Image (cartoon, grey):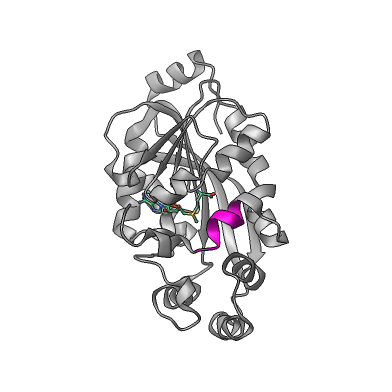
């Protein structure tokens, strides 16, 4: 198991994403899965990889919605991976250490980039570009600060015990959507935003990490007016030349 990941994910996470009984968790982990399902539904070939798939909650939900395909979960945390009883194949690895070579039609990634440094995020996105087939689709759900000040406060929250030790992660970088969009472009992707939504952070973190009243008070004191967090769902295609576009048309795999 990669050192530090249990702490990065947070004790409440596996239960949170699988059961999602609080309304915030349901909004983040369940309701918007429809958007992901609609994007996947437009792709004919379905060799799908869920990158940082945790306990397999997303795959379970997609299968529950009738989405067919061959699902591989690539996850660094062996304990979380062991809880996945939905994926067809489970690979315990860091995403950036996967072998090179195009083989997937769809790559899914939900709330994963921020658990990595900015440089690792760039390496991860380049790896996604590398392992996707030429007409492949990268479906990214990214959780982000709205501006640099929000980013600074979230960094404090997840690198120091200012709110609670429960929230400390190993090597987090809260990339803004603008930063991620630039990384996607530099890595050779064309990006279309499918949906953006915001969720109140207080309830979200309360439900996910089971914060005490004192921790909750410190949390609100730190975040102040930044009372919600932004989610962006995007479909990303490799920038193609004419031959790539024709190949996509022939394979019957329309854009996101
Ligand atoms: C917040 S959880 C999200 C899990 C899942 N994607 C979901 O939405 O249900 C983040 C997951 O990403 C994994 N992760 C983060 N960075 C990773 C990396 N570089 N390689 C592999 N797994 C990673 C963590 O171990 C954790 O399970």
Residue 44 in view here: yes
User: Is 140 inside the magenta-drawn segment?
Assistant: no
Q: Residue at x 50, y 17 (%)?
A: 249
Dividing the picture into quadrants, the one containing residue 37 is: top right
Dividing the picture into quadrants, the one containing residue 39 is: top right
Horizontal and vertical percent for residue 99?
27, 35
User: Is 14 inside the magenta-drawn segment?
Assistant: yes
Q: Is residue 214 above or below residue 2?
A: below
Q: Which residues are magenta?
A: 11-17
Q: Residue at x 46, y 58 (%)?
A: 178
The image shows a total of numbered marks equal to: 0
Q: Is residue 169 above or below residue 44?
A: below
Q: Residue at x 61, y 50 (%)?
A: 18
The residue nearer to you, when weighing 147 against 169, is: 169
**Left or right position of 30 against 76:** right
Residue 188 in view here: no
Horizontal and vertical percent for residue 115?
41, 59
Horizontal and vertical percent for residue 20?
66, 55
Horizontal and vertical percent for residue 106?
47, 32
The main secondary structure of the magenta stretch is helix
The residue nearer to you, when weighing 45 against 84, is: 84
Q: Is residue 190 above or below residue 155?
A: above
Q: Quadrant of the C terminus?
A: top right
Residue closest to the far top: 250
Q: Residue at x 48, y 29 (%)?
A: 88
The residue nearer to you, when weighing 146 against 140, is: 140
Dividing the picture into quadrants, the one containing residue 3 is: bottom left
């Amino acid at each position: 198991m990669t050192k530090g990941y249990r702490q990065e994910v947070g004790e409440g996470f596996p239960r949170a994403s699988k059961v999602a009984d609080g309304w915030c968790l349901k909004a983040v982990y369940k309701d918007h899965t429809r958007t992901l399902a609609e994007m996947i539904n437009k792709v004919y070939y379905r060799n799908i990889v869920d990158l940082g798939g945790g306990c397999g909650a997303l795959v379970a939900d997609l299968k529950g919605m009738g989405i067919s395909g061959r699902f591989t979960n690539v996850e660094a945390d062996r304990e979380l991976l062991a809880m996945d009883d939905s994926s067809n194949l489970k690979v315990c690895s860091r995403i950036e250490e996967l072998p090179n070579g195009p083989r997937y039609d769809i790559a899914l990634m939900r709330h994963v980039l921020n658990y990595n440094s900015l440089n690792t995020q760039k390496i991860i996105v380049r790896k996604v570009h590398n392992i996707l087939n030429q007409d492949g689709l990268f479906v990214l759900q990214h959780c982000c600060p709205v501006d640099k000040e929000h980013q600074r406060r979230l960094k404090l929250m997840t690198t120091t015990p200012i709110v609670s030790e429960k929230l400390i992660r190993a090597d987090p970088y809260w990339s803004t959507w603008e930063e991620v969009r630039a990384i996607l472009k530099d890595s050779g992707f064309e990006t279309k935003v499918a949906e953006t939504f915001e969720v109140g952070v207080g309830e979200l973190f309360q439900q996910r990490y089971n914060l005490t009243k004192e921790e909750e008070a410190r949390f609100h004191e730190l975040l102040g007016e930044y009372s919600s967090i932004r989610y962006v769902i995007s479909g990303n295609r490799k920038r193609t030349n004419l031959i790539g576009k024709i190949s996509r048309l022939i394979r019957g795999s329309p854009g996101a």
